[in-house]
Amino acid sequence: MDFFSWPPIAAVLDAAYGFVTALSAAVQPFAGTAAGLVAVVLLTVVVRAVLLPVGVSQVRAEFVRRRLAPKLAELQSKHGHDRELLGRKTIELYQEERTSPFAGMLPLLAQIPVISLVYAVFTHPSIAGHGNALLDERAFGAPLGTSFVGLTGAGPQVWPAIVVYLVVLALIAAVTTVSRKVLALPQQPAPGGPGTAATPPAGMLRALSFLPYVTVVFAAFVPLAAAVYILTSTTWTVLERSTLRRLLDPERRRPTEGGQPSISH
């Protein structure tokens, strides 16, 4: 049974679908045949704007983890041989700092229902018993309801539309590359220098750094509308996270000898 066919969820999905189609109709006069694509972008912006408090919570949690990293590494160095004692000391540290090792996870989980709903609007051919007209729309000749992989087997007549998909996938890859550099928090060195038990192997870190590119592969298998959502959301994440880190970084302002705060560059 499709989860989104359950009446309460179907009603919410239908409301989201109505909002997207209304956006498409509103931008039709100036967006023309790209109205559906513009509606997807606007919907993504609305969703991410609503979730801005979630982004604030995540950034604050990042700074907490960075601040506690040296202390956690020290505990690992001292008590790594005794897992029970290490766990107890770790919990005590978080209690002293009035935080939790799960700080930032609940805000992340809060995004899942919203993102799942938006994704369903872009992928379900039928919503609440009626057809999904959004998937019939085209942007520069490319159908919003068809994936890049699905279109490549349709014959040479679709190559002009495939260019649109290639551009979207290339932009996702470019934004992902920027995010790897912009969103990586500088790590404070752990006690004992490189090679301590708390420091992951360099090879593992390099491998994990390429995981975001899985998004590009995923985007090739979903409808173009969903790929545009991924592109817009990823771009928003880069801009939001970099801005919030500058605004919320506790090390940006520190008191000088005269007692006046100074901004570190």
Image (spheres, grey):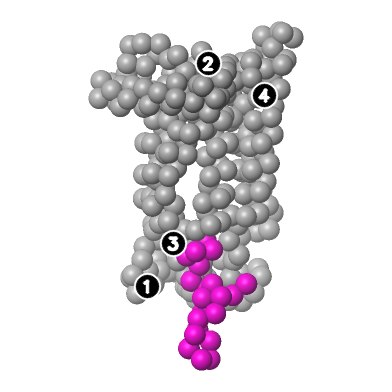
| Alpha-carbon span between mark 3 and mark 4 | 38 Å
Residue 97 shows which numbered tag? Answer: 1
As helix, strand or loop, the secondary structure at mark 3 comes to helix
Q: Position of residue 219 (x, y in %)?
A: 59, 29
2 vs 1, front mark: 2
Where residue 189 sits, quadrant-wise, is bottom right
| Alpha-carbon span between mark 1 and mark 3 | 14 Å
Q: Position of residue 122 (x, y in %)?
A: 47, 23
As helix, strand or loop, the secondary structure at mark 1 comes to loop
Circle 1 residues within 10 Å: few <14, some 14–19, many ≥20 = few
Q: Is residue 128 visible?
A: yes
Q: Which residue is mark 3?
A: 60
Q: Which residue is mark 2?
A: 137
- Residue found 54% across the figure and 63% down from its top: 246
Give the mark nearer the N terminus: 1 vs 3. 3
Disc 3 to disc 2: CB gap under 8 Å: no
Q: Position of residue 203 (x, y in %)?
A: 69, 54
